Amino acid sequence: MQALLGTRLAADVNLAAQIVLLIGLWVGFYFARTGQITRHAAMQTTMVMANLFFILFVMVPSFTQYVILGGTTGGIVARLMLIHGLLGVVAQVAGIYLILRMRTGLIPPRFRVRDFRLMMRWTLWLWTVIFVLGIGMYYYRYLLPKPVTTFTASLERFRQAGGDLVSQAGELRAAAERRDVQAARRAAERLVNLIE
């Protein structure tokens, strides 16, 4: 997905999707609390499986690019990615387990959690914490202004000086074409001052 949309756009799409998914999970919780178990099961299953798509096509490629291929394990973004990824795997596996536990007979009786309601609640709260970590990651990676280094500050001054030189050279040319000696002299003096 990142190859098609680019890293930032993929992150924006994922952020919007995660907001919808988290709201959907809490709506599913509401369905369970009000006794609408069929709607609860359908909502939670849909949200967990939709999240699996975003994990595979947005989060894993982003993690791979930033942490594994980028060799970055230090810094706030990398640390948030590592924690988010670890907790995310736990929450996604728990969600899939709950779907299999509640909707199929694939989980043998000896591996079935007896208090599945408690596991559902913990999974929902864990998912919410992971969402908050994801917001932090998004903020630090895409929204926080990057510190200006000496090199970038020098480069910006160089660009500004180049723009000033071009502007003054244009004024000098215009004054010369108009045969305005005084204006040409002022523009030439400003050019010399800029160069010094």
Image: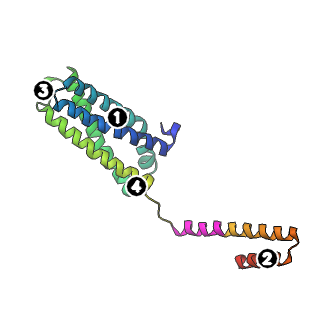
Q: CA distance from mark 1 to mark 3?
A: 28 Å
- The tag earlier along the polypeptide, 2 or 1, is 1
Residue 188: assigned label: 2
Q: What amino acid is labelled 4 in the image?
A: Tyr
Residue 9: assigned label: none
Residue 32, percent from left and from top = 18, 30
Which residue is disc 1 drawn over? 51
Which residue is disc 3 drawn over? 110
Overall secondary structure of the magenta stretch? helix
Task: Please report the residue visible at 74 percent of the width from the left and 77 percent of the height from the top.
Answer: 190
Q: CA distance from mark 3 to mark 2?
A: 90 Å
Quarter of the figure that contains the C terminus: bottom right
Task: Please report the residue visible at 88 percent of the width from the left and 72 percent of the height from the top.
Answer: 179
The residue nearer to you, when weighing 45 against 33, is 33
Q: Mark yes or no: residue 73 visible.
A: no
Q: What amino acid is labelled 3 in the image?
A: Arg
Residue 156, percent from left and from top = 59, 66
- The tag earlier along the polypeptide, 2 or 4, is 4
Q: CA distance from mark 4 to mark 3?
A: 44 Å
Residue 77, percent from left and from top = 38, 54
* Disc 2 versus disc 1: nearer the observer: 2
Residue 159 magenta = yes
CB atoms at circles 2 and 1 under 8 Å apart? no
- The tag earlier along the polypeptide, 4 or 3, is 3
Q: Is residue 192 left or right of residue 43?
A: right
Residue found at the far top of this picture: 105
Q: In the rendered image of this protein, does residue 19 appear above or below residue 114?
A: below
Which residue is disc 4 drawn over? 140
Q: Is residue 60 left or right of residue 89?
A: right
Q: CA distance from mark 2 to mark 4?
A: 47 Å
Q: What amino acid is labelled 1 in the image?
A: Asn
The span picked out in magenta is 149-160
